[in-house]
Amino acid sequence: MSDTINFIIDGVEIQGREGQTILEAAEAAGIYIPRLCHLKGLTPHGSCRVCTVLVNGRPQASCTQPVAEGIVVESESERVQQIRRDIIDMLFVEGNHFCMFCEKSGNCELQAMAYRFGIPTPKFPYQFPKRGVDASHPDIFVDHNRCILCGRCVRASRDLDGKHVFDFVDRGPHKRVAVNAEARLADTNLDASDKATEVCPVGAILRKRVGYAVPVGKRLYDEKPIGSDIEAAKTK
Ligand code: FES
């Protein structure tokens, strides 16, 4: 019996496989669905909602929603784009993101997403939360001001490094990433070669002593928009 699953994205017939998510099946067909908390190789988390699509008219996170026979998915409609724009706006205002002073500028997926969606400045009021910086570790520093709670570091440390250095604590607006030590990152067993240090989509976890090795203007998303590698695969 074939495990092919036929469904539609934006009017195009797509074949997925049993067990694939909508995001994975779309990507295999060369259709990019924007995402922030999702990263290939990590367990899907479904927390940022940037990958929202309408499935038979209902909003769903495409990174966790499995494909199903005959579903009709909207990903590029103006309604979906507006949902994503609002989510990206909210991610900017609920943290402290000063791109012009951030070492991640040009490599930051949140910044790249704002460019992709044509967001020059957020429409919601800035919250300017008071958050800390942990520079205690000899090789890595954590700036909670830029954290978007995507949980990539939590999942990478737990599932790829087998360490559980990071985890979420508190709830609602007080939710934050904490380290598995009394107080400081330096008291954990985090190593600079850990996967958890590589996966942050923003500038919340950065390596020390390598800043600006690649000049601003020559970085990943300075060269090409986020998602363009997947979209280019479709046109080949
Ligand atoms: Fe799907 Fe974040 S990428 S919820």
Image (tube, rainbow, N blue to C red):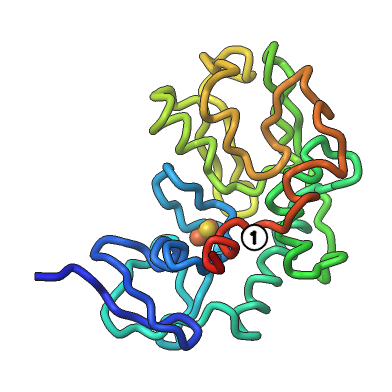
Disc 1 C-beta below 8 A from ligand 1: no
Quarter of image, res 131: top right
Q: How many labels were placed on the picture?
A: 1
Residue found at the far right of this picture: 100
Where in the figure is residue 130, as x and y percent of width and height?
Answer: 79, 42
7 with respect to 114 (left or right): left
Residue in view at x 57 percent, y 37 percent? 199
Q: Is residue 88 above or below residue 138?
A: below
Q: Quadrant of the N terminus?
A: bottom left
Residue in view at x 86 percent, y 46 percent? 98
Residue found at the far left of this picture: 1
CA neighbours of label 1 inside 10 A, class few (<14), some (14 to 19), many (20+): some
Residue in view at x 34 percent, y 81 percent? 7
Residue nearer the viewer, 171 or 68? 68
Confirm whether residue 200 shows in the render: yes
**Secondary structure beneath disc 1?**
helix
Residue nearer the viewer, 38 or 151? 38
Q: Is residue 112 above or below residue 189?
A: below
Query: What residue did someone put label 1 on?
Result: 228
52 with respect to 216 (left or right): left
Residue nearer the viewer, 146 or 74? 74
Confirm whether residue 50 shows in the render: no
Where in the figure is residue 75, as x and y percent of width and height?
Answer: 54, 77
Q: Is residue 39 above or below residue 48?
A: above
Q: Mark 1 is on which residue type?
A: Ser
Residue in view at x 23 percent, y 65 percent? 18
Quarter of image, res 92: bottom right
Where in the figure is residue 90, as x and y percent of width and height?
Answer: 72, 63
Q: Quadrant of the C terminus?
A: bottom right
Where in the figure is residue 11, as x and y percent of width and height?
Answer: 47, 88
